[in-house]
Amino acid sequence: MTNVKEKGPEVTFTEPVESGNGMKTQEMVINMGPQHPSTHGVLRMELTLDGEIVTRAVPHIGYLHRCFEKHSEAMNDYTKVIPYVDRMDYVAAMNNELGYAIAMERLMGIEVNERVEYVRVIMAELQRIASHLLAVGTFGLDIGAFTPFLYCFIEREKILDIFEKASGARLLYNYIWIGGLMNDVPADFKTDTAAFVKSFRPKIKELNDLLSNNKIFVDRTANIGVLPAQVAVNYGVSGPSLRGSGFKWDLRKDDPYSIYDRFEFDVIVGNGEMGTLGDCWDRYIVRVWEMEESLKIIEQALDQMPEEGDVQESIPKKIRPPAGEIYCRTETPRGELGYYIISDKSTTPYRVKVRAPSFVNLSVLPAISVGAMVADMVAIIGSIDIVLGEVDR
Amino acid sequence: MQQFLESFLPAGPLVVFVFSIIPLMIILVYALFAIWLERKVAGHIQDRLGPMVTGGWHGWSQTIADLLKMIQKEDIVPAKADRFLFKMAPFIAFAASYAAFVAIPFSSGYIGSMIDIGVFYIVAITSLLSVSIIMAGWASNNKWSLLGAMRTAAQTVSYEVPTVVTILSVIIVTGTLNLMEVTEMQTGNAFLGFLPNWLIFHSPFMVIAFVLFFIASLAESHRVPFDLPESESELVGGYQTEYSGMRWGLFMLTEYADMLLLSLVGATLFFGGWNSPFGSFMDGPVWGAFWMLLKGMLLVFVMMWLRWTLPRLRVDQLMNLCWKYLIPLSFVNLVLIALWELIF
C-alpha cells in the first residue's frame, strides 16, 4: 500500500453559469491529453465542460517539438534534411520526402528521368493509402470499433512490406533523394504492387460494410463537427478535411507536380450523404474513397512505368543550389505540405520552413467543437486526422 | 446438495460455508476462462490468433499469468482520493454481483437459496453495482472518473426499467418469481412435439421480450455498444482510471461476473435453465449444471461477438434508445404477452 505523499493541485471549478432554464451549472475545466488514448499523440485539449457539453476547447501543442527548422539550418548538407523530413509526418514519410525532393529539384533546376517519376508517384500513392488506412482505422477506434482498426493494419502491413523491400525501412524510409532515389526498386516491385492493388479493392467494400455504413457509426459521426467550406477556407484547412466540406481542391489536379497531370482520377469531395455537408462522416468517407482513387493512379502508373532507367543519374555530386528561394507545395494525405527553402549558395540551407497541413488543420478545432460532447470531441479530432509529429515538428 | 455435502462433511458451519462458496468458485474459474476466451474471440474476429504462448496449448494460462502479475502490482491510492470509499468500491461492486448468484439455480440439485422472490432479489441487489461505481468515480477525485460515474448512474438507472419490465412480462407467464420454479416449469418437450418446453417458444412476443432483455442486459453489464462508463477512447478508463493492481482486477472480475449473471438469468427465463435441450436425454443434476453454464456461456459469447464488431453509442443516444424505444416497446410487449396469456 503506497500513499503518494505529495498533494496534487486543488481541483478548480469556474463560477456557476446560467444555463438558460433558470438553473445554474458549474463548468469544469478538464485536460484531454497529453496522455489520452484518442488525441492521436501528445495533443492537449483544454476543454471547458458544462456537464458533458464542450463550451470551449483550446488545443495546446508543442509536446513533440524537435526543432526541425533549426536542425535543418545546422545540417551542413541538404541531403541530411531528408531523414528529418521523414520524422515530421511519420505515417506518410514518402509524401514528405517527395515534397522536399521536388522543392529542391525546382530550386536547382534538376530534371529526373521517367522511371524515377513513376516510382515516386507509386510510392507516394501507396503511402497515401497506408496513411488513410491508419486514419480510417484509428477513427473507428475513437468511435469504439476495435476490429476495423486491425483490418486496416493488415492491409497497411502489405504496403509497408513493399516499402521495406525497396528501401529497407518500414516507417522512415529516406528513399526519395534529391534528383533520384536511394536505389532502384526490386525486380518484383511491379508484381507485388499489382497484387496488392488487386487484393485491396474488395477490402474497401469490406470496410464500408463493417464500419462506414454501420448505424451506430453513422449516428456517432454524421452531423457532428460540421465544418462549412467557408470556415475551412478561412482557416486554411486543406486535404481531405477540406474536401470533406465539399470544396474541390486537390493539388494533384489544381497545381500538378511531378507527373500527376498524366493520370485519370477523380477528386473526391464530401456530399453530406449521411448528414450535414462537412461533418465527421464526410471527412471520413473522403479518405475511404481517396484510397480507391490512389489505386487508380497506381494501376495507370504501373502500366506506363518504363522498365529501364538509372534512378541515380540526376543526383548531383555536390548539392549547392543557386542563391534564391522557393516555395513548393504538394498534396500529402493530410493536405497541402509546403516547403519554403532559402539558399545562400552554400551547402547548408539558410532556412527551411514547412507549412504543415496538420498544424493548420488543427487550428480549426476550437471553431467546430463548441457545443459538442466529450465523445464528439474524440470523433472531431479523429476526423481532422492530425499527426502530432507534423504539428510540432 | 446440502444433504450430499453433509454426507461427508461434519454438519454445521462448514457445510454452509462450502455450500455458499460454490458460486464464488464458479465465478473465479469462469472469469479465468472468459477472459481467455474474450482474447481468443477478439483475436479470431480480428484475423489474428490471440494468446498462443503462455502455458502451451493456445495460451490457456495467459489469464492466470496476468492475475499473478496483477496481484504483485503496487496498490496506488491517489493523494486526494477519499481513501475509505476508494478502497471499498471494488469490494462492494463484486459483493453485489456475487450476492446475486445466490438466487440462480445452477442445476436441479443446487441453488444458493430457495427464496420466493428470486428475480426481484437479483434485480435489487445488482443495483448496488451502480452505487459502487459512483463511489469509485467520486472517491477517485479525478474528472474523467467522475464523468464515467455520472454516465453509469444515468445508464444503470435507465436500463433497469426495460430489464425489469421484460422480466415482469416473463413473470406473467410463469406466475412465480422463484427461478427454480421457473426452470421446473420448462421441463420436457411440449411445442410441436420436438421443441423443448422453453419460455422463448411460448409465444412470438417472448422472442421480442428476450431481444429487449438481452439489449438491456448488455447495457446493465456495461458491454459494447453500451460500455460508456469505461469507454477507453473517450474517458481514458472512466471510473477505473485511478485504480491499479488487484482493485482494478476486482472491477474486471465484476464486469465478467455480471455478464455471466445476466446471461444465466436470461438462460433461466427464456432457455429452460438447467433443462436439457433433448428432453430427458443427458438430464440430471450434474448435466443440469453443464447445460446451465453452457447456455450462459453461449450468451456471454454473443456479448463478446458484439463487443468486437460494433462501435460505441454516445451518451445521449444511449438514453434515447432506452427511453424512446426500449421502454415503450417493453411495455407494449408486456401488454401483448398479458393478452396472449388471457386468450390462450
Image (spheres, coloured by chain):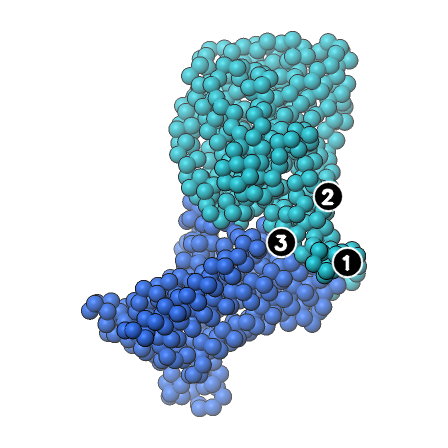
Chain colours: A cyan, B blue
Q: Secondary structure at mark 1?
A: strand
Which quarter of the rendered picture does the C terminus of chain A lie within? top right
Name, please, the residue furthest toward the front.
A21
When the figure is inspected, residue B128 is found, relative to residue B13, above or below; the finding is above
Q: Which residue is mark 2?
A: A58
The residue at the point 66 percent across, 29 percent down is: A233
Q: Secondary structure at mark 3?
A: loop
Q: Which residue is mark 3?
A: B235
Residue B196 lies in quadrant: bottom left
Q: In the displayed structure, does residue A386 sit left or right of residue B326?
A: right
- Amino acid type, mark 2: Val
Q: CA distance from mark 2 to mark 3?
A: 18 Å
Q: Which residue is mark 1?
A: A16
Q: In the displayed structure, does residue A324 sit left or right of residue A162?
A: right
When the figure is inspected, residue A241 is found, relative to residue B157, above or below; the finding is above
Which quarter of the rendered picture does the N terminus of chain A lie within? bottom right
The reply to whether discs 2 and 3 touch (Cβ–Cβ < 8 Å) is: no
Q: CA distance from mark 1 to mark 3?
A: 24 Å
